[in-house]
Amino acid sequence: MKNSIFTNLYAGSSKIRQSMLCLPLFLGLMTMTVMANEADNRQVLNLSNPQRNHVLTEMRALLAGTQHILAALAKDDMAAVAEQAQTLGFNMKHKAENPLHDVLPKEFMQLGMSMHKDFDQIAADITSMKDPKHTLQQLNATMGKCVACHEIYQIQVSGLDSPKR
């Protein structure tokens, strides 16, 4: 008897089945609409295309270097951790702070400089302490600065030299 009730309910109600199939789609569209309507209140950094590329190249280098540090930590290779952290410190090649000093906001510059200082400190501490857990805590704090920066700022290409479409 129970089977026949469920069978009849399932077979006799194609509109209910269609509605149930459409529900996830409807909820997904509603979520996307709400997200699209949220204002992006981050501070806009209007940069030329070369300036934008310079900043993004540094960000990618910091991200890749952090991944290399994590990989070295996973292998207990403290020498590689120290070496990689040092390359991300104040002596990092192509730091955005140098050529863009007069273009970027002071707070953005301070955040970037503090990250380079963090990596120098990680390199120094890993050499003296050789404590992977301490290094992970330091790396966590440094990555928090990445998150904060991306929550505060957005980069837009200034209209003067934006790419032609």
Image (cartoon, grey):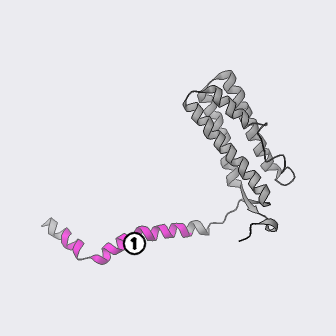
Residue 86: x and y in percent read: 72, 33
- Looking at the image, which is closer to me, 78 or 19? 78
Residue hosting label 1: 22
Quadrant where the C terminus lies? bottom right
The amino acid on which the numbered mark 1 sits, given as a three-letter code, is Cys
Q: Is 22 in the magenta?
A: yes
Q: Residue at x 65, y 44 (%)?
A: 63
- In the image, the segment drawn in magenta is 6-33
Say which quarter of the image contains residue 69: top right
Q: Residue at x 71, y 52 (%)?
A: 56
Principal secondary structure, stretch drawn in magenta: helix
In the rendered image, is residue 76 in sight? yes
Residue 156: x and y in percent read: 74, 62
Decide: is 11 above or below 54: below
Q: Residue at x 40, y 70 (%)?
A: 23
Determine the residue located farthest toward the front in the rendered image: 164
